[in-house]
Image: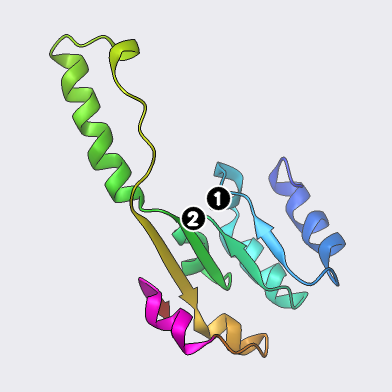
Amino acid sequence: MANEAADVKRALTQTAGDGAVLVPDDPLSVNERTRIAELALKHRLPAVAGHTQIAEAGVMMAYGPNRIDLYRRAAGFVDKILKGAKPADLPVEQATKFELVINLKTAKALGLTIPQSLLQGADQVIE
């Protein structure tokens, strides 16, 4: 687990040989996404993240909520609050749209084959 940028290299180096790594969906991971992708590839670790930007930076795969949809829905809450609604009275909502991004270039570099059925179900395939 990495709590700051300096911990990222140590965390991925210690994980080498474990088979795969799950990249947490947090601000540090997004900020360090390029370094995480490079280190995961260097240590031949298939990495899966919850944020699509991390897959776009080079980790093998990301599956998580569609951020644009979340922001659009958040705008509706802001509108209600600005019109006088009490935040405590608004319903709690969970994400309803998720997206799968597969970085096929990284998978190939790791010597992995992604099943065609998974590629067909992906929202984005990076080649």
Q: Main secondary structure of the magenta part?
A: helix
Instruction: Tell me which label, 1 or 2, sits earlier in the chain.
Output: 1
Mark 1 Cα within 10 Å, few/some/many (few <14, many 20+)?
A: few
Mark 2 lies on residue: 51
CA gap, disc 1 and disc 2: 11 Å
- Examine the rendered structure and indicate whether residue 70 appears above or below residue 125: above
Q: Residue at x 46, y 68 (%)?
A: 56
The residue shown at (58%, 69%) is 59
On the image, the x and y values in percent for residue 26 come to 57, 44
Residue holding disc 1: 31
In percent of width and height, residue 50 lies at 53, 55
Query: Which one is in front in this view, the residue at disc 1 or the one at disc 2?
Result: 2
The image shows a total of numbered marks equal to: 2
- Kind of residue indicated by mark 1: Asn
Left-right relation of 105 to 69: right
Residue 112 vs 23, above or below: the answer is below
Residue 78 within the magenta-colored segment of the rendering = no
Q: Nearer the viewer, residue 51 or 63?
A: 63
69, above or below 90, in the image: below
**Residue 114 falls in which quadrant of the image?**
bottom right
Quadrant assignment, res 110 = bottom right
**Residue 54 x %, y %:** 52, 61
Q: Secondary structure at mark 1?
A: helix
Magenta range is 115-124
Q: Secondary structure at mark 2?
A: loop
Residue 9 appears at what percent x and percent y?
Answer: 77, 58
| Residue 4 image label | none
